[in-house]
Image: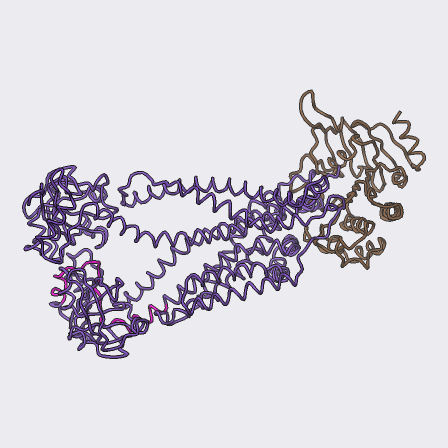
Amino acid sequence: MPGVAFAYGSVGGYAQFVDHAGNAIGNARSAEGFSFDPNPNLSAVHIVAGHAPVGPHQVLMDLGTAHKHHFATGQQVRVLLPGKPETFTISGLVKFGSADNLAGISLAAFSLPVAQQLFNSREYYDTINVLAKHGVDNVALQRAIARVLPPGVQVVSGQEIASEYSNAISSALSFITTALLIFAFIALFVGAFTIFNTFSITVGQRTRELALLRVVGASRRQVFRSVLAEAAVTGLVASLIGIGLGVLAALGLKALLGAFGITLPSSPLVFEARTPIVALVVGVGVTVVAAIAPARRAVKIPPVAALVAQLEDQRDSLRRRIGLGSGVGIVGLICLLVGLTEPSIGLVGLGTLALFVATAMLMPIVARPAAGVLGRPLAALRGMPGRLGRENSMRSPRRTAQTASALMVGMALVSTIAVLGSSLGRSATSEVNRAVAADYLVTSGSVSREVAPTIAKLPGVETVSTVYEGQFDFKGSLSSLHAISPVHLSRTLTLQLTAGTAAPALAAEELLIDSETASSNALHVGSVVPVDFAQTGPTQMRIGGIYMQNPLVGSFVISDKLFVSHFDNPLPVADLVRTTTGATGVDRELNRALAPYANLTIQSRSQFEQKSQSQVNQLLGLIYVLLALAIVIALIGIVNTLMLSVFERTREIGLLRAVGMKRRQVKSMIRSEAVIIALLGAVVGIVIGTGLGVALSWSLRNNGVTVISVPLGSLILFLVLAALLGLAAANWPARRAANLDVLAAIATE
Amino acid sequence: MNTQTPAAHTVALTKAYGAGETAVRALDGIDVAFERGRFTAVMGPSGSGKSTLMHCMAGLDAPSAGQTYIGERELGQLDDSELTELRRDQIGFVFQAFNLVPTLSAGENITLPLNLAGRSVDREWFDYLVGALRIADRLSHRPSELSGGQQQRTACARALMSRPELLFADEPTGNLDSNASAEVLEFLRRSVDEHRQSIVMVTHDPRAAAHADRVVFLADGRVVGELASPTADSVLEQMRKLGS
């Protein structure tokens, strides 16, 4: 065609390297095979060592994989493919752009004819790369090419591809961004409690000083501003330090990813101007807002407070506190309930927030008796120091409650996740029995097509069913679609039908959907729905059956034959194996026969159950790590409060030392107080968190959470952990108190 | 117990603040002994070193040179833990103010040192003290609910509860009116007369000093005079002499 400088067709597919030890490298989703394009202007990869692959037994490997797994040009490497695994000679090494590989994805490049054969596309190309001649109008060329191509083939410019990739990456990252922002918000919320508490205490300690300011002529407004200004400066300094640490953390993360073999192609860190501005505004804003209530209390200090020896503690009326706290609590509960039934994540979040604020408001009322009860065993155990620690935790209920509140939020969230996770885990386990009838599951991101016939020939195997997974457009939204053979369906997969049929409907090329999807879309057997497949275009499907949720196959199931007709060379994701009754040693046979396929996971049904439990646990672990941040902030709050209390009680500690309290006993006293504060926060947090977790699990009862389970063991562990963390938090204040200069503390002159 | 050794004494006790030429000697080579079963008052103008002397003798402050003894024990040989035990078991304290732990009741404050030591309370002695000090009906109250006089009397009970070798009183009547002062001083006198308690009281009030058996006068970190069987007038007379 006129205007075309160079055109090269390419094909791609699944190709996963096997390392020297015989293990598959990475996973199926991060293993990319394709035909090598010799034109450096079109190819995203370029050779940095060796030469392009020639003939049927040569392959190019990405530099990242080669370095990490010690491969060099000229060496042999085994490659897992859609068909049987094969051995190749490494003809050269390639880089992707400037990076050693593409964000951790391993690259295997073959010559075009080899790739076509391996990926079963001899007659056609996946893609044809076209390089325009210099000075040719890209858009015009694009239209000209489109005119000569059959319908269903897209012609896109390089720029479009680039922006499409960028969008895909952004949308994949947006989930992570959202999750991280939620945790950042939690951290800020807990931090706000600590700031509020600190300012409350310092305003109390500076009563005389603030009153003196009033005496010499400062107006209420000026006192108010002075407290807020202090908060703003504190917030500014803290935010700047935080931004600095954030940049360091990003650098550290990048290095960490690098160490795990994932090199990001975008070499410099992106530091947008927006980032520090938002961080500063949020940091200073949160600090100032948290200081408003203490500042208002400072304003209420009368000038006479500078002159009288001891001023009665100014307290908000109890009734007002109860009223306001209960009000906020009720609003929070309503938001929560409506949010859960709606369901609306926003309302649930808002309700939870209100509930936390209400609890924090009401906690000072119960703090004194609660601290008394929690401290009783300590007083008995640690003697006089424990007794004094208990008394100290009770003497200022508001301070104790506010300090405990920050920990309460963290512990509540951790407990919520624990209850939710336990319920999810238990539900998953109890559902597996109903999901799978097969005795063994052979799974991977990509299972070679050769695997099913291999298994079928083994002794003791009754039947093998192949499961495919892909995406299709269901009523306008991209959804996950599974496929399985209707033959022997009941022997491999357990579908509990609520309407219609399973195997006959699949055989008739109809669609099966789960009951949740059916009810939320008002669909029933016989409904005809529009669907769209990426390769074959839009079509209509009749719904042939509705089944109870099944964790293995998700929400949509069609027959394997239909799936293969809509997808281009799909690879199975699982083979379900049913053994003949009484057959033994099948697992050994499976392991032996499938040994060449290094990427496969062979599980018995019970192992599969454990796996789904452990997947839930892995996710929980990640959430716990992020929530630990909130707990750490709460602990810093405890350290802070105790430091201020030690400072405030200098004379008292001096007196105790003078009349014979040992350093060890002083430390024990401070530690006891810290443990009581921590336990108070933990107990209230765990109670609220358990409630929240049960409510959340209950609201998910139609989404597969069939069992509500409260993990008592974990909750008790949290309580013990909180006490230990309180002990750790007390370390610094305790040492400070123990090393107090007795003389300076008691000197009156 | 050896009745020959005094309850406490110092040998060339020196306490200097700062170093080199700017050093200030709060105590300048003091040799003083406080006899057993006697009530000694230490007097002197502000900055004479009388509080520093008491702090060094009670193991609250470390001397720069010289030694201090409680009984036969030299305090310089003791580490922090041993000093704390010494204060807890062998020394009683009554300060000018802030004598009581606000979170404990009066009764608990009295037994605090015994509780810290994990020792049992001598009920008879306890009842005697709170009876003599007229605080038996205030024992369950917190310090904030007691008058200044009651607080100081509670402190006296606390100081004597462990039957210490020596009681140090630092301006014990400094914050009290004359009636409350008299009550505290008379009790201290009585404990010397009836129980052979050794007492060292730092004061600048001649009327308080008049309750003692002996007055030691300090000025500029040195012992500058002594007076046996003092009266308020003789103390004033001596002070006037020293002042001129």
Q: Which chain is depicted purple?
A: A
Percent x, y for residue A628?
Answer: 45, 53
Q: How many marks?
A: 0
Question: Horizontally, is A512 left or right of A5 in the view?
Answer: right
- Specify the quadrant of the image occupied by residue A52: top left
Question: Horizontally, is B231 left or right of A393 in the view?
Answer: right
Q: Is residue A439 magenta?
A: yes
Q: Confirm whether residue B193 shows in the render.
A: no
- Specify the quadrant of the image occupied by residue B136: bottom right
Percent x, y for residue A151?
Answer: 12, 58
Percent x, y for residue A143?
Answer: 13, 50
Colouring: by chain
Q: Which chain is depicted brown?
A: B
Q: Quadrant of the N terminus of chain A?
A: top left
Q: Is residue B10 above or below residue A127?
A: above
In depth, the one of A608 and A353 nearer the eye is: A353
Residue with the most extreme right position: B233
Q: Confirm whether residue A299 shows in the render.
A: yes
Specify the segment rendered in magenta: A426-455
Q: Quadrant of the C terminus of chain A?
A: top right
Question: Horizontally, is A236 left or right of A370 in the view?
Answer: left
Q: Is residue A582 magenta?
A: no
In depth, the one of B126 and A239 nearer the eye is: A239
Question: Horizontally, is A169 left or right of A40 in the view?
Answer: right
Residue at coordinates 55% horizontally, 61% vertically from top-left? A358
In depth, the one of A498 and B119 nearer the eye is: A498
Percent x, y for residue A486?
Answer: 17, 73
